Amino acid sequence: MKKIEFFYDIVSPYSYIAATQMAQFEGKAEVVWKPVLLGGIFKATGNSGPAFTVPAKAPYMFKDLQRLANYHQIKLTMPAAFPANTVTVQRILCAASEAECKALTLKLYEAYWGQGKDITNLELLTELVGADLVAKTQEDAVKNVLKANTEDAVARGAFGAPTFFVGDEMYFGEDRLFLVHEALK
């Protein structure tokens, strides 16, 4: 069975859309959820968020996201805390076991993009994932996983999120999932 590596950050709304669609690959490929720090990718590649580089893009992007959410029949609520510093959130996902990572990712996406909650609030974050995972975010081993995932994505050509790899082939953006399907054939 082929493998899809899914590099994402909770702060990325297009990664949220993609995450809600990853179930379509179940039974067709092994999906490996790889949390990264989008800010780290941007810094390493000289990139920046699409809503901040061209003033006209922000209103379009939010309209586009709502269209996508409607199309995929998922809830989208623009978080007041956007963009958010997701270092702790991404470390939580790196601290989780592989078996827990997908479910926790979807739970955190639902809280942030589905309900518009401020997931950088430690009290809310602890309520969502538990004190043990929050505490692990300070461990060097967990910090190193996030750093390694981010560096791996950049080294392989990533410049944003979501980014997918099928073998050595990179696909960028939730709108390229149809090409990921093609790569699995």
Image: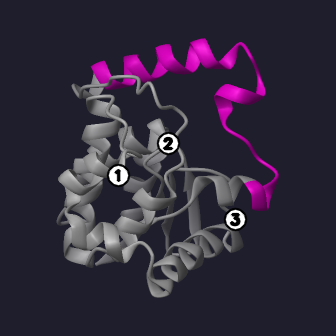
Identify the image quadrant of the N terminus: bottom left
Q: Earlier in the sequence, mark 3 or mark 1?
A: 1
Residue name at image x 25 percent, y 26 percent: 75
Where's residue 145, x and y in %? 49, 80
Amino acid type at image mark 2: Ser
> Magenta residues, as a range?
43-70
Amino acid type at image mark 1: Leu
Q: Where does label 1 land, which residue? A: 122
Image quadrant in which you'd find residue 119: top left
Q: Earlier in the sequence, mark 3 or mark 2?
A: 2
Q: Give neighbour class at mark 2: few <14, some 14-19, many 20+ (Cα, 10 Å).
A: many
Q: Where does label 2 land, which residue? A: 12
Look at the numbered disc 3 and give the secondary structure of its residue: loop
Label of residue 113 in the image? none
Which is nearer the eye, 76 or 20? 76
Q: Give neighbour class at mark 3: few <14, some 14-19, many 20+ (Cα, 10 Å).
A: some
Where's residue 133, x and y in %? 28, 70
Look at the numbered disc 2 and give the secondary structure of its residue: loop
Q: Nearer the viewer, mark 2 or mark 1?
A: 1
Q: Where does label 3 land, which residue? A: 157
Amino acid type at image mark 3: Gly
Q: Is residue 153 visible?
A: yes
